[in-house]
Amino acid sequence: MHLGNIYAALMSWLEIRSRGGLWVLRHEDLDPQRSRFEYASQIEDDLRWLGLDWDEGGLDGRGCRGPYIQSRRSDIYAGYLRILTEKGLTYPCTCTRADIMATQAPHQTDGRVVYAGTCRPPRLGGMGAPRPGRPAAVRLYVPEHEVKFYDLIRGYRTVELSGHCGDFVLRRADGAWAYQLAVVVDDALMGITDVVRGDDLLTSAAQQIYLFGLLGFEAPAYAHFPLLVDAEGRRLCKRDRSLEMGELRLRYTARELVGKIAHMAGLRDTDTPVTPSQLIEGFRIESLRRGPIECRL
């Protein structure tokens, strides 16, 4: 983990603890190229070091709604994909990322990739078909449809889904499960009532809410908090080795690091050392700063 991950974990933990809820640790290891057991084990060690405990999940599978490791839930995802397929809502797609990027409008600069429906079949109002001999992903048909929801931090949101993302992938061409399907199925089956995460995932919320409805589930409440950024306004990521947990644990105690994060987030007037538990009283996710937060370590 790096500082941005720690900040996200702390905000999520505080929101749930301040409301007397249960914090669930789920390992989302869908990408086989980037997921290893030792990475998951290190994440858990870092969370314990920080003082962030969980009630369900983790590698030891605490709780009765596991497994809490997504790579072990493939049969479950397959069952729900089958439901959508039997409803006639999915189709195979052989478009590569290069194919899709070539269809993007020149003025589209917000980073979203909107699928143009190249492989959408005539039965769903398209004129396409998958190319023979190419591996195919599975896409969900998205009609013109508005998704409306309330975010605890960002307020009321309305997203016109076909223009926002178009038909989106449920299973990749290499067989890996897509994030959108996996988290919706897992949140529903694990009884997740509140999703607290960074606003880089705000654009995913409408897609997930739409999927919840198609599968007959009630969507959770969402809270998307502002991200930590560097001095140039760029989102923190692993490119800055000095902000990785291995380095941070050498430079700070857990209480010192939590105190600095709490100060940056506007939870305290000073960056003096503090434990996560000492921040619970009076915490309100709605009071977090709305804009990006500059990292000052």
Image: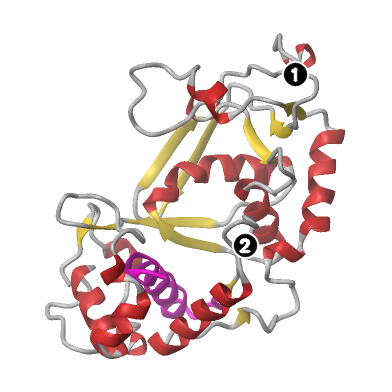
> Local crowd at mark 1 within 10 Å, few (<14), some, or many (≥20)?
few
Q: Which mark is residue 111?
A: none
| Residue 190 figure quarter | bottom right
Q: Earlier in the sequence, mark 1 or mark 2?
A: 2
Compare residues 163 and 106 and report the one nearer the observer.
106
- Residue 24 seen in the figure: no
In the rendered image, the vertical position of residue 43 relative to residue 110, given as above or below? below
**What amino acid is found at the position of numbered circle 1 in the picture?**
Arg
Task: From the top left corner, tell me how far across and down residue 191 is, in percent.
Answer: 67, 66
Residue name at image x 49 percent, y 18 percent: 102
- Tell me the CA gap for discs 1 and 2: 30 Å
Residue 98 in magenta?
no
| Residue 121 figure quarter | top right
230 vs 153, left or right, is: left
Label 1 belongs to which residue?
131
**What amino acid is found at the position of numbered circle 2 in the picture?**
Asp
Compare residues 128 and 32 and report the one nearer the observer.
32
The residues colored magenta run: 1-23
The answer to the question of whether label 1 and label 2 lie on touching residues, with beta carbons closer than 8 A, is no
Residue name at image x 61 percent, y 28 percent: 96
- Residue 25 seen in the figure: yes
Residue name at image x 56 percent, y 78 percent: 22
78 vs 42, left or right, is: right
The C terminus, quarter of image? bottom left
Label 2 belongs to which residue?
29
SS state under label 1: loop
SS state under label 2: loop
**Which-is-in-front pick, marks 1 and 2?**
1
> Local crowd at mark 2 within 10 Å, few (<14), some, or many (≥20)?
some
In the rendered image, the vertical position of residue 82 relative to residue 116, given as above or below? below
